[in-house]
Amino acid sequence: MSYMMQSSNSLEAIHFLPQTRLQTVVNFFLVSLSYYLFGALALEVVTIESWVTPIWAAAGIGYAAVFLWGYWFGFAILLGELLENILFIKPLSWLELLTSTGNTLSLLIGIWLVRQFLPHPQAIFSRPAYVGIFCGSALFISLLSASIGLTFRLLFDTIHAISPLRVWWTWCLADLVGILVIAPFIITGYTEQKHAWYRHKKAEIILLFASLMTVVWLVFGQPIEATISAYPLTFLLMPFPLWAVFRFGQRETLLVIVIMSTSAILATISQSGPFTHNSLDYSLLILQAFIGVICVSTLILMAVVNQRSLLESQLLASQDDLQEANNMLEQKVLVRTESLRQSMEKYQAIFTNAIEGIYQTTPTGKLLEANPALAQMYGYASPEEIMTKVPDMEALYVNPERRAEFHQQLQETKAVYNFEAEVYRYDGDIMWIAENSRLVQSNDGRALYYEGTMIDITERKQVEEELLQLAHYDPLTGLANRRLFQARLKQVMAKARLSGKTGVLLYFDLDGFKKVNDSLGHEFGDFILQEAAKRLKHCLRDRDVSCRLGGDEFTVIAEQVMREQDAVTIAEKILAHLTKPYIYKEQEASIGVSIGITFFDGHNYDIENIVKQADNAMYSAKRSGKGTYRFYTQTTENTG
């Protein structure tokens, strides 16, 4: 696994590295001094002109300073350039001033172009593409600087060499190699995160540099005849950049390059090593071409390994995130599963223990699910038994039309509430149910099944019936009471008005009832009232209504009676049946009946007037000797 470190996350995402004012001043003068010293050393090795050297490490110092701390450090570079010219090339002329300015401007322009693509110094060696931008900028700066400098020299006619192109090439290559070797080492030293080497790493890094120095001594430590066959010795140096790239950080890798380059240059200047040639200028040019290739290759490999490490870290982080997400998902699944299990248990408990019948049926009525309460309600021992023995719930309805209404409501409204119907139990008894149900449909609207609940409301219906009986019927005789009498009379009058057929109202009481009730007791009196009610029902048609208004007063509503004779027939039947003796517990009593009769057609009178007319006619019958009937006439009303 690669140990190339990523760019420091502690540095802010800014264009230049942050520094205090004191740090800025110190760095400014350090850059000027370093530029001057390295330039002075390089000018000790001149090969073509007194001012042309194939070694210019100062270019790398200037590149790193401007790249790290900003364009103001161009003045530090210019100051270093001027110091070189003042101290080594006397006197200082306009040519030297213009040349120094051109070198500085070339550097500033090149860095400005780089910063358009690489705004953050930490990212410069993190990807192969960024390394390409760095190398391209180094080449651009070298070409521009050499071109500007050579142009000024030609203008001032200070070139004495045979070939100006050779001067330009030497100048360009010196700047390029200086930037490629020195600038990455300085930039990485300030931007790469510090390593905390463990003991085995410390031993390995010592072994790396000890081996490197040994091989450098073997390759460059002794004079070698300058032949092509000597060049393969340089391949002995190749493993060391690879070793550093794959096992250590960028700083260690670039330190290996600096040591190799410095050792090779010093050895070649001393006419030692495989690059030794009769011409020192030629030897240094070949050496720097070799160094340039090694630097570019190492930087690209370093970026590739760094990017791979970054991708591996991201992959590991993604795997960790994925594992964490998977763990969270598994936890959620476990929680959901447990919640679902609890919900199912809760639902099953509700389904099993509910006092309401719960069911699912197909739209045709076949039971799909049934709980114990439903089975018990219908008289079956278990849900399995009712699902087996009841092929169709529709067959349990007493009135098939109610089941049809149930289907229709579900199709129209998708749900029904408090739907009441009579159904058969397993033993054949009839019970009332109240049902809530809904239609469950598929996504395409097809009816899948009905599901709902039902309760047994038989007792409630019985209570309602009893309450209805108490509200509309006389509890002693079972005949309609005054409230129901008025409602029925209103209905019959409305029918008469619509049909044009008259109806008749008979109003009567029991003559002598009070005397019997007082003498023989209320129990005998109640018996007479009950018996009179039974006899009265036998005197009437099915559509006629008999009522007890209270005490011993009774009425009969007969509809569609057009002739007086029909009314007389009803009255005579009542007289014949109700005047027969009443025998109760070996006691006998006889009573009479006085009947008042009035016709109505629904147009001329209201209910109160109709009742009043019949009442007046009854009293007319009483005045006539009782035990008879009388029709209402105007004379009857006047005498009443």
Image (cartoon, rainbow, N blue to C red):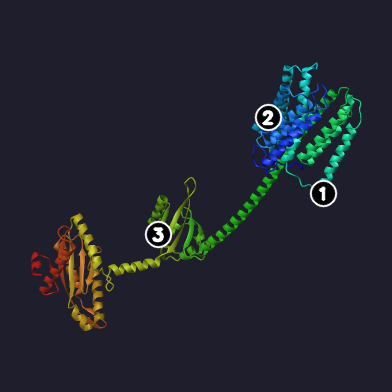
- Measured as percent of width and height from the top left, residue 270 is found at 88, 29
**Of the image marks 3 and 2, the number of the one nearer the N terminus:** 2
Q: Amino acid at mark 3?
A: Asn
Of tags 3 and 2, the one toward the viewer is 2
User: Which residue is under mark 3?
Assistant: 418
Q: Residue 533 occupies which quadrant of the picture?
A: bottom left
Q: Residue 488 occupies which quadrant of the picture?
A: bottom left
In the picture, measured across the screen, residue 401 lies left or right of residue 52, that is: left
In the picture, measured across the screen, residue 73 lies left or right of residue 276, that is: left
- Residue at 48% x, 45% y is 444
Q: Secondary structure at mark 2?
A: helix
> Label 1 crowding class (10 Å Cα cut-off): few <14, some 14-19, many 20+?
few
Is residue 538 something that shows in the picture? no
Question: Residues under labels 3 and 1: Cα distance?
Answer: 85 Å
User: Which residue is under mark 2?
Assistant: 108
- Measured as percent of width and height from the top left, residue 602 is found at 18, 58
Question: Residues under labels 3 and 2: Cα distance?
Answer: 90 Å
Q: Amino acid at mark 1?
A: Arg
- Measured as percent of width and height from the top left, residue 507 is found at 18, 69
Contact (Cβ within 8 Å) of mark 1 with mark 2:
no
Of tags 3 and 1, the one toward the viewer is 1
- Residue at 22% x, 57% y is 495
Q: Amino acid at mark 2?
A: Leu
Q: Secondary structure at mark 3?
A: strand
Identify the disc placed on residue 199: 1
